[in-house]
Image: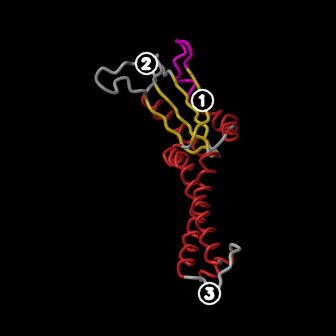
Amino acid sequence: MLERKMKSVGGTLHKNTSQHGRYSIIVLFNFVNFVHEFSLDLLRCSRYTMIFHLVLLKIKPSASGEQLDNLAASLKSLSGIPGVLSIQFEQANKCVYVGYDDRTKGYTHALMVILADKKALEVYDKDTLHQLVKSTVIKPVLDTTVNDPVLAVDWEGEAPELSSKCSLVKHYGFYLAAVGALSLAGFVALRYRSRL
């Protein structure tokens, strides 16, 4: 079984290989497999980012509960647009803890949309359902008596679920590369010594 595996990666085993040599081959094979998986993780971490689309709204005080429920349902329906990974819509909390400094500047609600990439943001912006929700659901409940009833900000950032894994992968990458180089050097030295 091991012989077949090693042949598949270009290695060869000889019948007279010592027990010690066989163990070193197994260790090397497992290490190469680990480095391969680690490299894939590093590649994912270096390339996988998302677009975060944050919208702050100033809703007029006269907006009814029914209008707000319709607004929440309509915004959550936008999750069906291709490339939209997540949508959250909530009312701003002006008292998160005792002594909390209200910094909302009059914004009453926040919408956070996470999209797969820049192209997904473009698709989302131009989508017919999105345009319809903006004109028929959002616009009627905005407080137009104040300045800037809508504020939108977009940025590109690391995928949240990969953040901790990526920082670990990037932090230990150098050390693992050094261990790999030393292991390979040790394996080559053992193989060379066994042939002497």
Provide the residue span drawn in magenta.
Answer: 134-149
Above-or-below relation of 174 to 123:
below
Q: CA separation, marks 3 and 1?
A: 80 Å
Where does residue 56 sit, x and y in percent of width and height? 52, 25
Q: Which residue is mark 1?
A: 136
Mark toward the start of the polypeptide (2 vs 3): 3
Q: Which residue is mark 2?
A: 103
Q: Secondary structure at mark 1?
A: helix
Do the residues under discs 3 and 1 have CB atoms within 8 angstroms? Answer: no
Picture quadrant of residue 144: top right
Q: Is residue 106 left or right of residue 152?
A: left
Q: Which residue is mark 3?
A: 16
The residue closer to the viewer here, 60 or 91, is 91
- At a point 55% along the width and 18% down the height, the residue shown is 149
Q: Secondary structure at mark 2?
A: loop
- At a point 56% along the width and 37% down the height, the residue shown is 113
The residue closer to the viewer here, 11 or 82, is 11
Q: Which image quadrant: the C terminus?
A: bottom right
Q: CA separation, marks 1 and 2?
A: 29 Å
The residue closer to the viewer here, 143 or 150, is 150
- Sort mark 2 into few (<14), some (14-19) or many (20+) by Cα contacts within 10 Å: few
- At a point 48% along the width and 30% down the height, the residue shown is 67
Give the residue type at disc 3: Asn
Give the residue type at disc 2: Arg
Q: CA separation, marks 2 and 3?
A: 76 Å
Kindly give the residue lying farthest to the left in the view shown: 98
Total count of labels = 3
- Sort mark 3 into few (<14), some (14-19) or many (20+) by Cα contacts within 10 Å: few
Above-or-below relation of 107 to 172:
above
